[in-house]
Image (spheres, grey):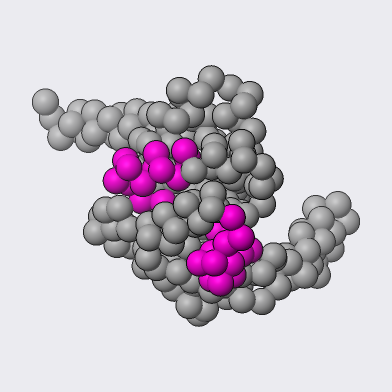
């Protein structure tokens, strides 16, 4: 084969592999497109500690093995954004990472066949569970959440979680069931990042500016 044929075959191989990854992401029962647009290029605070550590997590993904992250802080601080940036950066490297809110994940276990979801929870290279603590505190819901967390940790694969809960609330929960869950998360997510500040006003301003640009042809 000539060099040009070899290069064409390699390009086709890369195209098929990229399509396989896209299909694996979008056909997963864990897929939620609400997180698709987040990327580090959109980060208004690239010098913040959470931003730097999340970028480093992606850069050193091959060394992470089963090492997870916990991002905690007030609502609107950017926890979900940074977690989604990690997911999307890894996807661009051909790694079918997944991110799902805890409420959607638990609802899916009720609405869909349980086995495909649990299989995905165990097998995706990286799972992000967003907004731990937002789930309903019923015995049934907490038992489902424990099964999700336990299955993921038993798989030996990394887990990232975001939460509005404080370290005190995570380490001193008010029920035994929550203690079972949070203690496992605390152990699995040894790197814990406090994400501070309310970034939603800035995000809202950016969205308004984009809407004015698109609809009115005006900048700013």
Establish if 188 lies above or below 20.
below
Q: Position of residue 92 (x, y in %)?
A: 42, 47
Q: In front here: 212 or 148?
A: 148
Establish if 101 lies above or below 192.
above
Q: In the picture provided, is 46 more to the left or to the right than 188? A: right
- Residue at image location 24% in from the left, 28% down from the top: 9
- Residue at image location 44% in from the left, 58% down from the top: 183
- Residue at image location 37% in from the left, 65% down from the top: 190
Q: Position of residue 143 (x, y in %)?
A: 54, 39
Q: In front here: 206 or 184?
A: 184
For the record, the magenta segment spans 147-175
Q: Position of residue 145 (x, y in %)?
A: 53, 42
Q: In front here: 28 or 4?
A: 28
Quarter of the rendering containing residue 81: bottom right
Q: Is residue 39 visible?
A: no
* Residue 170 located within the stretch drawn in magenta: yes
* Residue 176 located within the stretch drawn in magenta: no
- Residue at image location 58% in from the left, 43% down from the top: 142
Q: Is residue 150 visible?
A: yes
Which quarter of the rendered picture does the C terminus lie within? bottom right
């Amino acid at each position: 084969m000539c060099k040009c044929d070899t290069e064409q075959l390699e390009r086709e191989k890369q195209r098929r592999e990229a399509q396989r990854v896209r299909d694996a992401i979008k056909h997963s029962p864990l897929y939620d497109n609400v997180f698709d647009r987040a990327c580090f290029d959109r980060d208004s605070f690239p010098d913040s500690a959470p931003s730097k550590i999340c970028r480093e997590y992606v850069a050193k993904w091959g060394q992470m093995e089963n090492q997870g992250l916990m991002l905690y802080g007030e609502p609107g601080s950017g926890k979900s954004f940074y977690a989604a940036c990690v997911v999307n950066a890894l996807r661009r490297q051909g790694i079918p990472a997944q991110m799902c809110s805890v409420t959607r994940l638990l609802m899916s276990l009720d609405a869909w066949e349980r086995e495909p979801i649990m299989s995905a929870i165990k097998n995706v290279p990286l799972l992000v569970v967003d907004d731990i603590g937002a789930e309903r505190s019923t015995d049934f819901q907490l038992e489902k959440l424990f099964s999700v967390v336990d299955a993921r940790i038993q798989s030996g694969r990394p887990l990232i979680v975001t939460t509005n809960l404080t370290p005190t609330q995570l380490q001193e929960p008010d029920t035994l069931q929550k203690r079972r869950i949070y203690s496992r998360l605390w152990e699995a997510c040894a790197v814990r990042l406090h994400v501070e500040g309310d970034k939603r006003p800035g995000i809202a301003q950016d969205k308004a500016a984009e809407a004015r640009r698109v609809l009115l042809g005006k900048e700013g």
